[in-house]
Each structure stands twice: as C-alpha cells, then as structure tokens.
Amino acid sequence: MARAHRTRRRLSMTSLIDVIFLLLLFFMLSSTFSNFGEVELSGSGAAQGGEAQQISPFFLRLSQTDMSVNGDPPTLKSLAARLESTDGAPVLVSVQADVTAQRLTDVLVVMRAVPGLRVTVLGGA
C-alpha cells in the first residue's frame, strides 16, 4: 500500500495582517479623544441642626451656552474666584435640559478646586 504523500502549503500571513490592520483602523476611528474628569458624587443626607437654614445658598444656573451665579454671568475661568466668597454656603447647580455631560463635568471640576465648597446638583428643567 502506497500512502499518498501530502505536501504542506506554507501558511500565508497576509490575510491575518490585513484583518489586524482593519481592526486597528476600526477602533481608532470609533473611539473618542475627549477629556474626561472624575466627579465625586454623594447621596443627599439630612440637614444637621439648623445650620442649613441660617446660611442662604448660592444659585448657579447652567445651560449649554452660558451660566450665572446669583444672576451674575461669570466665565468658566472666573467661576472659581467667584465661588471663593461663599463662606461655607452651599452652591445649588441648576442644570438646564440642553447641557451635555461634558459641560457639567467641566464646571464641576472647576468647582472642585474651591476648598470647602458644598455642591448640590439639581435636575434639569
């Protein structure tokens, strides 16, 4: 009995390399290169004593194009300096319906630089 001798073809790597480059191209084009920041969130708790009633809060109204602190429109760069004068008063942030998550994160990152600032984010209108 004579066995048929098989000759092995050499495996071509060209197809594998093409698939790898296509996957690399797909993931590069489908990813975003935005700046993301961390924002610490905590649940609301009960007010301690009568402290919250004695200090009137600051009110920050945030929309996609502008913002105002107690009616005065600061820029994003001057926001931290404006909020340093809160003297322990809480800051209520009213987020309008057109605000993106990135815009809210940018504002909260600026506000985090102010020491001792208590921030409460309210729902959109």
Image: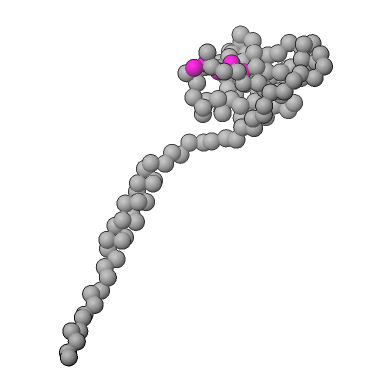
- The residue furthest top is 71
- The residues colored magenta run 93-97
The rendered magenta stretch, by its main secondary structure, is classed as strand
Q: Residue 29: which quarter of the image?
A: top left
- The residue furthest front is 1
- Which x, y percent locates residue 68? 59, 13
Would you say residue 96 sits in the magenta stretch? yes
Q: Tell me: 56 left or right of 40.
A: right
- Which x, y percent locates residue 10? 25, 74
Would you say residue 52 sits in the magenta stretch? no
Q: Residue at x 38, y 41 (%)?
A: 30
Nearer-the-camera pick, 111 or 22? 22
Q: Quadrant of the N terminus?
A: bottom left
- Which x, y percent locates residue 72? 61, 10
Q: Tell me: 114 left or right of 77.
A: right
Say whether residue 65 is visible: no
Q: Tell me: 73 left or right of 116.
A: left
Q: Is residue 61 above or below residue 27?
A: above
Colour scheme in use: one colour
Say whether residue 108 is visible: yes
Q: Is residue 62 above or below residue 32?
A: above
- Which x, y percent locates residue 22? 31, 51
Q: Residue at x 43, y 39 (%)?
A: 32
